[in-house]
């Protein structure tokens, strides 16, 4: 195992601010929205693969087309909440919400 020196350490928050803009800026909000879309797509793709369902089959089940599922999974588009529920239902997933009190 290699030991890191202080010269190799860096501030992750500063790196994020540099790449995506400071917290509260429009650039940062846009980057966060892209990240949420990507994350949502990954959740759907993972669930679809675990269910052993093709993109075409998932699209058929929700009344859409394969290219839409592909765009969602890649984070290019984010489904409406109602469509997200339909997708999760078609994959046999249950959605739960809880409050942190």
Image (spheres, grey):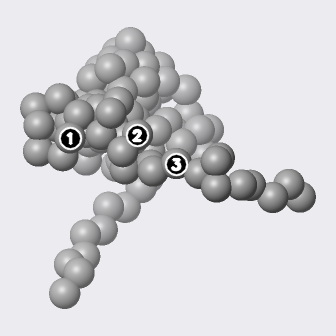
The image quarter containing residue 86 is: top left
Question: Looking at the rendered structure, which numbered label has been put on residue 12?
Answer: none
Q: CA distance from mark 2 to mark 3?
A: 8 Å
Identify the secondary structure beneath mark 3: loop
Identify the secondary structure beneath mark 1: loop
Say whether residue 75 is left or right of residue 12.
left
**Residue shown at 23% from the left, 81% from the top:** 100
**Which quadrant is home to the N terminus?**
bottom right
**Which quadrant is home to the C terminus?**
bottom left
Find residue 66 and report its horizontal and vertical position in percent.
Answer: 41, 16
Question: Looking at the rendered structure, which numbered label has been put on residue 10?
Answer: 3
Mark 1 or mark 2: which comes first in sequence? 2
Say whether residue 1 is left or right of residue 15.
right
**Residue shown at 20% from the left, 41% from the top:** 22
Find residue 70 and report its horizontal and vertical position in percent.
Answer: 42, 19
Residue picked out by circle 2: 15
**Marks 1 and 3 close (CB-CB < 8 Å):** no
Is 13 or 90 nearer to us in this picture?
Answer: 13
Question: Looking at the rendered structure, which numbered label has been put on residue 22?
Answer: 1
The image quarter containing residue 93 is: bottom left
Is 9 or 23 nearer to us in this picture?
Answer: 9
Q: Nearer the viewer, mark 1 or mark 3?
A: 3
Q: CA distance from mark 1 to mark 2?
A: 10 Å
Is residue 83 shown to the viewer in this render?
no
Q: Is residue 10 above or below residue 25?
A: below
Mark 1 or mark 3: which comes first in sequence? 3
**Residue shown at 23% from the left, 34% from the top:** 21
Within 10 Å of disc 3 (Cα), the crowding (few <14, some 14-19, many 20+) is few
Find residue 80 and report its horizontal and vertical position in percent.
Answer: 16, 36
Is residue 41 shown to the viewer in this render?
yes
**Marks 2 and 3 close (CB-CB < 8 Å):** yes
**Residue shown at 16% from the left, 37% from the top:** 29
């Amino acid at each position: 195992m290699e030991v890191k020196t202080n010269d190799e350490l860096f501030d992750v928050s500063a790196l994020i601010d540099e790449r995506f803009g400071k917290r509260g800026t429009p650039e940062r909000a846009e980057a966060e929205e892209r990240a949420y879309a990507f994350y949502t797509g990954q959740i759907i793709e993972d669930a679809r693969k675990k269910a052993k369902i093709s993109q075409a089959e998932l699209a058929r089940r929700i009344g859409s087309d394969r290219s839409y599922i592909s765009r969602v999974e890649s984070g290019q588009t984010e489904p409406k909440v109602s469509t997200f529920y339909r997708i999760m239902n078609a994959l046999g997933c249950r959605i739960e919400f809880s409050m942190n009190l």
